[in-house]
Image (cartoon, grey):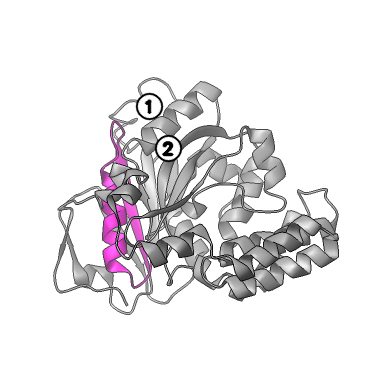
Amino acid sequence: MESEAEMSLEGFDGRPLVSVIIPTRDRPAYAARAVASALSQQDVRVEVVVIDDGGRVPLLDRWHIVDPRVHVRRNDTPRGVAAARNRGITESQGSWIAFLDDDDVWAPNKLRLQLDAASLADASWCIASAVIVDTRSVTESFNLCEPDAAAVLAGLCTRNAVPGGGSGVLVKRSMIEQVGHFDESLSMAADWEMWHRLAHSSDCAIVPDALIGYLRHNTSMTATFLDHQSEIMRFDVAAATYCTAMLQKRRLGYLEWIADQTAPYDRWKAARLKFLVAIRRRSPKTLLMAVRFLLVPSHVELRRLVLRRPSALAALSTPDWVLSQHSNPTIQYLSEATER
């Protein structure tokens, strides 16, 4: 583990302690918010490497960056989120690496708490829980960590058991060098496959607090989950290397996970997947869940019907650091930037 000097605010040998990698494409406002969130981290020295993955308008044509800790690199053509993260790893300097998706934000003490947890556990990587919010910063649910590293390892065989998608992991650079970079043949499952390799190489440290603000919206990759079913099955070829569970059990687990992820966007499709799993498992409980998807709106849908706008009650369940939107003058727009 790092010496006391390396774990300090100033980092080691003048280098940043943590490199934050943000892949993005054509979402300048979201990406600016993510950058501000990374720079707002308390008691830790960071650099932020933004990979503009072939956006229609280059980020540097939109942004004037006034903080020297931010570095933007551009792929002339889109290469995918895994390749963008890999480029960020290669072009960064920190002894620790953290991944942040462009539409997510962090609690201001996220990196500090993870570094402390990793140090205490003598771990090479660390995860934390997440709060899932909509575009109005209304909390939809919480994605909590498993209780220990063994449960994370077991959970990865049927679902992505690391909360926060690509935004929840802090990992030592030396561990990335040991297990290898992200698999660029994958997109939706690229982080999941990487977590497999990390979990089978070293136990993770766990911070149970919700430190990641995971934004759920209609243009996110999660919203197109059904488009990625074939990729999940291709991912299983890699997962079979690590998971001893029978193929049928793993794949039914994947389908059920996809159904749960799809439900906030299309409960009819989610119900069909649940029915399929229920029939193959001969599970009355899963069948009831499928019926619930069809007949009973989820708590998310009920909120959208009842809470036409965020109410004071809804705001009480949403952390202040999510509501603040991380206002920061780090990036000044050269021209009007809108989400497309």
Residue neighbourhood size for the residue with mark 1, other residues' Cα within 10 Å, grouped as few (<14), some (14–19), many (≥20): some
Residue 150 vs 104, above or below: the answer is above
Instruction: Provide the residue designation for mark 1.
Output: 6
In front: 180, or 211? 211
Residue 235 visible (yes or no): no
36 vs 97, left or right, is left
Query: Which amino acid, by three-letter code, is at mark 1?
Result: Glu
In front: 197, or 179? 197
Image quarter where the C terminus lies is bottom left
Q: Is residue 42 magenta?
A: yes
142 vs 231, left or right, is left
Q: Is residue 49 magenta?
A: yes
Residue visible at 26% across and 59% down in the picture: 32
Where residue 142 appears, as percent x and y from the top left, is: 49, 47
Where residue 225 appears, as percent x and y from the top left, is: 57, 69
Mark 2 to mark 1: distance in Å? 9 Å
Mark 2 lies on a secondary structure that is loop
Query: Which amino acid, by three-letter code, is at mark 2?
Result: Ser
Query: Pointers 2 and 1 in contact (CB under 8 A)?
Result: yes
In front: 147, or 125? 147
Residue 309 visible (yes or no): yes
Earlier sequence position, callout 2 versus callout 1: 1
Residue 119 vs 251, above or below: the answer is above
Quadrant housing residue 204 = top right
Where residue 227 appears, as percent x and y from the top left, is: 60, 76
In magenta, the rendered stretch is: 24-52
Marking on residue 95: 2
Quadrant housing residue 270 = bottom right
